[in-house]
Amino acid sequence: MGTPVSGRKNPQLEPLIGFFVNTLILRTDCAGDPSFTELLARTRETALAAYRHQDLPFDALVSALNPRRAPGYSPLVQVMFSLQDARGRGLRLPGLSTEVLDVFNGTAKFDLDLVLTHREDGIQGAAEYARDLLDPPVVEHLCAQYTRLLTMALRALHTPLSRLNRTPTKGSTP
């Protein structure tokens, strides 16, 4: 899975205007049927290791690994996941009113791109996907299952992942 990271660590980029984002590739080991808490710890370590190498451009990684390429597919990663913090988002300038607009150019850059946005009133999710690969009902089901899994995991943090689907939630029967 890939996740975007700001590419502004280099001081030489500070005075420049532009969109400097790099893609980090994350792989989490689910071997041994960990609990949600254990999986979070593993994911944290994976993310921290990836952030230590965030200055390596994604294109340089692709060149070094030289994966078999297929037209229409992003190399190395087909699924992106990002968490954005939109609380207090916006530009405040004297005498001007501004607003942030979400723009979609009509083309999915990945097979599936899941974005969670932390807003003042909670967390909102969105999915962008390649319609030639995925149908809307499939993506809606995937998002509903993801929400359900997170809800169940938060109620049973130490339950092995394989058992979360069988863990009853409030108001449900086992």
Image (cartoon, grey):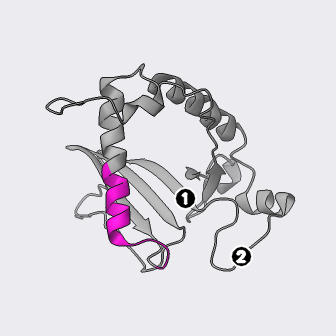
Residue found at x 75% / y 51% = 56
Relative horizontal placement of residue 63, taking residue 123 as reference (left or right): right
Q: Which residue is mark 2?
A: 70
Q: Work out whether residue 59 or residue 172 is closer to the camera in this orientation and state it.
A: 172
How many dots with numbers?
2
Position of 10 relative to 59 (above/below): above
Residue found at x 33% / y 28% = 154
Residue 150 drawn at (x, y percent) = 35, 37
Badge number at residue 79: 1
Residue 135 drawn at (x, y percent) = 39, 72
Quadrant location, the C terminus = top left
Which residue occupies the extreme left position in the image? 171
Which quadrant of the structure image shows residue 106?
bottom left
Q: Work out whether residue 37 or residue 4 is closer to the camera in this orientation and state it.
A: 37
Residue found at x 70% / y 53% = 12
Point out the stretch of residues depicted in magenta.
132-144
Relative horizontal placement of residue 62, taking residue 5 as reference (left or right): right
